[in-house]
Amino acid sequence: MKRRLLAAALSALAAIAGAGVTAAHAVERAQAEALAEAYQRVLADPTDVAANMEYARLAEAVGQPRKALATYERVLLNDPGNAEALAAMVRIRHLLQPDKTLITFDTGFGYESNPLQRHTDLESSLKAFANARIEDERRFGDTRWRTLITGNAEYFNNVSELDYAYFGAVSGPLLPVSPRLTINPFAGGGVSALDNAYYYSEAIAGMQFEGYLQGAYQLMRVRAGYRDFGDQSVSTDGFYADAVARWAIPAVATLDDVLVFTPHARWSGIGGIDVGPGPDDIKPGEYSQWGARVEYFNKVADWLTLGGGVDVTQTLYRKLYAPDGDKRDDVMIEPLLSAVFNRALGMQTDLALDYRFQWNQSNDENRDFENHILTARVVTRF
């Protein structure tokens, strides 16, 4: 009896499974027939927008995105203002991009004439540094996702209190909103060390807008963060927010040059006393800051790219005061020069020489300083 019941149950399951397979095959046949019929209507009149849209929707539904993309592009040739076709084209192009991982590593040596940024009792130092950046993009389901991992370290032979290391990561989806614009909301965090001791950890969230305009890659990034400092730090825990944009104009004077304009602004609620240079560009002191950088790069030969520019930044401190009682007001002017020897050490490896001069003018003369920074670094990508 039990055997007969088991056999009957197995037969019923087999019948159900067979019916499911049969139904799936029937759906596939119906979709294939509908797609073929829609294609015949397109062949009858390739300029028929309605017929093309029907075929493109069906092709996308049955998992043939390349056919759908070609059809949406054909629709836009005949109907450039078709919003559905434009949105679908952007979406499918985005999805068809291959997964990629780009690793950039640079390391080298440098010299600073006044790394402690003092007004008097200057102390110069040699330094060694290394920076790594991993940018990974891949598709999860119907969404492309970007993850950015960064790490850097800096060692000074004369001023160990500036020895610094940082490791952090942010991640978020890439959302195409037009053929030329993508939005990347992101979140993440990082941790750092200063003078061989814990310095701070941070949480970060923000959004980046990027795309190709006027033949060059442009971007704007806004972000906010919170830093939690160690007990030995002169800084207090607090929030910060900043924004930066990059606008590039290629072929200004020659076919191989580019002019880059980079405005930037920051608000910091991180308390403490600004006793000297910070290991990154967010200093304690609670301030508002704004400025801009202008740079010009020219590939003068296949093996050499020369660049120069200037960065001007004003920092208004809210709780730090000059001797006359006014709130501290600093202006930093930084001329920049660079020479990149393209592929000097291999197809993916460049040699770069950089010079930067920091000239800080403050209404507190004790915070005036000058600092010459020279570096030589090897930059490799793989």
Image (spheres, helix red, strand yellow):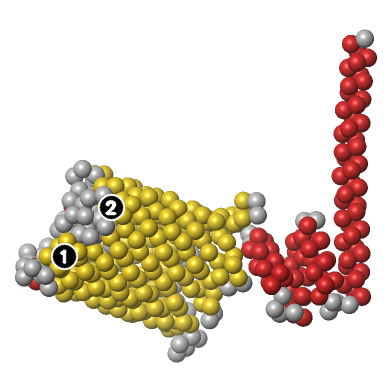
The quarter of the displayed image where residue 206 is located? bottom left
Of the residues shown, which amino acid type is indicated by label 2? Gly
At x 59% / y 57%, what residue is drawn? 144
- Is 25 drawn above or below residue 257 in the view shown? above
At x 55% / y 56%, what residue is drawn? 173
- Is 90 drawn above or below residue 240 in the view shown? below
Residue 107: in sight, yes or no? no
Numbered disc 2: secondary structure: strand
Q: Where is residue 374 in the image (x, y as percent from the top left)?
A: 25, 69
Residue 84: in sight, yes or no? yes
Give the left or right position of residue 102, taking residue 376 as reference. Answer: right
Label number found at residue 238? 2
CA separation, marks 2 and 1? 24 Å
Label number found at residue 117? 1
Quarter of the picture holding the N terminus: top right
Q: Where is residue 96 in the image (x, y as percent from the top left)?
A: 67, 61
- First in residue order: circle 2 vs circle 1: 1
Q: Position of residue 220 (x, y in %)?
A: 45, 69
The quarter of the displayed image where residue 118 is located? bottom left
Of the residues shown, which amino acid type is indicated by label 1? Gln
Q: Position of residue 111 (x, y in %)?
A: 22, 65
Q: Which residue lies furthest to the top in this view?
A: 1
At x 45% / y 87%, what residue is drawn? 252
- Is 144 drawn above or below residue 372 in the view shown? above
At x 92% / y 69%, what residue is drawn? 40
- The residue lying toward the viewer, choosing from 48 and 117, is 48
